[in-house]
Amino acid sequence: MNIKFLGAAMSVTGSCHLITTDKYKILLDCGLFQGSSALEKLNRESFGFDPSEIDFMLLSHSHIDHSGRIPLLTKHGYTGKIYCTDATADLVEVMLKDSGYIQEKEAEWFNRKAERSGNPMIDPLYTSRDAEDSAKYLEPILYNQLFEINPDVHVRFKDAGHILGSSIIELWIKEGKSITKLVYSGDIGVKNKSLLRDPEIVTEADYLIMETTYGDRVHETNEESLEKFIDIILKTSRRGGTVVIPSFAVGRTQELIYELNMYYEHHEELKHELDNIMVYVDSPLATTATEIFQRNAQVFDEETRQFILKGDNPLDFKNLKFTRTVEESKQLNFDSSPKIIISASGMCEAGRIKHHLKHNLWNPNSSIVFVGYQAEGTLGRSIVNGDKDVSIFGEKIHINAEIYNLEGFSGHADKEGLLEWLSAFQKPPKRIFLVHGEEDSKKNFAAAVKHVLGYDCTMIEDVSEFYLNDDVILSVEDLNNRIASEEQLLKVRNKLAQIHEEMGNIFYNTHLAVDSGTTQKSVNEINNIILELEKYSILLGAAVSNLT
Ligand SMILES: [Zn+2]
């Protein structure tokens, strides 16, 4: 078996790894290169393999740097299945369509310039129609299910806690009589993060492919960032300014809505003041994504599910408003009352956020709050870096607004989080490949792993290929036959008792909610709950009959 690293090798974007066994070609992720124009050029180059020869693909999560070249893959002959979790399938469909739309707009803009200067025109990288076509290959499977793709390949998705639906992929590959276990970390999230469950641990692997986005950084905590965030909101609104938040439409935006909602619930003393500050989510994609989050509530963390069971919607509160149309979006800039605007894109390169920056960057009363990674060469990076003048839509804007960068809201584990995750392995994998990080980050993390755990790491620095030997270390049978530990049994018993209680609550609350005054919307919500219950009762029934 061999593995070829085709992306997220020199940088953090363009994740794409190809595993070739004696019988199959398996692709892990197929992401877009993002950032500098040299990187973006790579998107138009060959994949480094023939898409029609790939047997199947495993997708770790919906972020475009992991999924964004899927429409190109299917356009160039790929016809296999794309396995991922349910929530990833829902999210990636809308994200790819949005990406296709952006590609079309960029090509239009490029061609208008090319026409004036007599340069050759280009086709969009792919269109939103191509993206729609590629979605039919998505094959959702459940978290933690040992899934047989074929008799030689088993796979299991564990929660990575990075974005809704994100996964760590475990892969058992049989060649001849031996089975090799490969683990792909995907992007690893942060513990105790709102909405999402903590990243799950993995204890065994022959070979590990691991991300290192923040392999050289330690963030402040989420709580520290939240306290600062509320303080910025209050200070800004008291002086009559607007808080503008450039945010990725999917993931970070929903986490922010949730954080604000929870804060409002638990801080009566500030409730009146905060209730008077409108929060606008100004991005059509964010609106759709929020609906998908609401549909996939079964994979939220415990705290959020308790909140839902109380009958509350964690992604909605009184002074929150979603704006869809361009007209509504423009109106926001004529409204002088204190407010918060959350808008995409996260790195300020495209979308409605540019209009809101143009109307607020000059204003000393306003604040701009960054909540995610800003890549080199983007407008977001130059604002964070403290540039005093920027150009937006060809107009020079002098920056007077207050600028903040809250790293505690990041969706990526920091150096300590990554080390903690790796330390759960009971013995060192035969080889640890470090990907998805800048050079310094990989170097720093490899040194920390050597120092703390005594393991050697292989840093992937360019497109490269490795032959893996095929010693038997773990097999699917070993895994299933091992006697469960006391701790595991206790966990399972507690979980069952909890489900029993939750079910009782759901039945009681939904029963109460149905009366003659019930709205159409409530009926839809209850029907969704019923559908989820039916889906799981069928799965549960099948699982239990397998056990007994
Ligand atoms: Zn990601």
Image (spheres, rainbow, N blue to C red):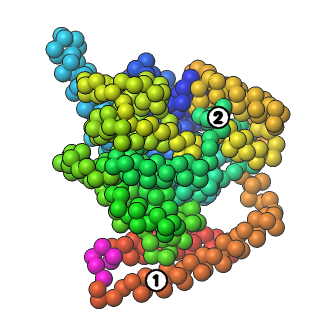
What residue lies at 60% left-to-right and 80% top-to-bottom? Answer: 500
Quadrant of the snapshot with the N terminus: top right
Circle 1 SS class: helix
Q: Check the image and name the residue furthest to the front.
A: 239
Residues rendered magenta in the picture: 518-523
Q: Verify whether residue 300 appears in magenta.
A: no
Type of the residue with mark 2: Arg
Query: With respect to residue 179, does 8 lie above or below?
Result: above
Determine the image quadrant of residue 412.
top right
Near-viewer residue (189 or 217):
217
Q: Position of residue 140 (x, y in %)?
A: 48, 54
Near-viewer residue (529 or 196):
196
As measured in the structure, the alpha-carbon distance from the residue carrying label 2 to the one carrying label 1 is 45 Å
Q: Position of residue 15 (x, y in %)?
A: 52, 33
The reply to whether residue 203 is visible in this rendering is yes
The crowding category of the residue bearing disc 2, from other C-alpha atoms within 10 Å (few below 14, some 14 to 19, many at least 20), is: some
Magenta stretch: helix, strand or loop mostly: helix
* Nearest-to-viewer mark from 2 and 1: 2
Which residue matches tag 2? 217
What residue lies at 21% left-to-right and 47% top-to-bottom? Answer: 334
Label 2 vs 1, first from the N-terminus:
2
Which residue matches tag 1? 509
Q: In this view, does 518 lie to the left or right of 257?
A: left
Quadrant of the snapshot with the C terminus: bottom right
Q: Check the image and name the residue furthest to the bottom.
A: 516
Query: With respect to residue 441, does 279 lie above or below?
Result: below
The crowding category of the residue bearing disc 1, from other C-alpha atoms within 10 Å (few below 14, some 14 to 19, many at least 20), is: some
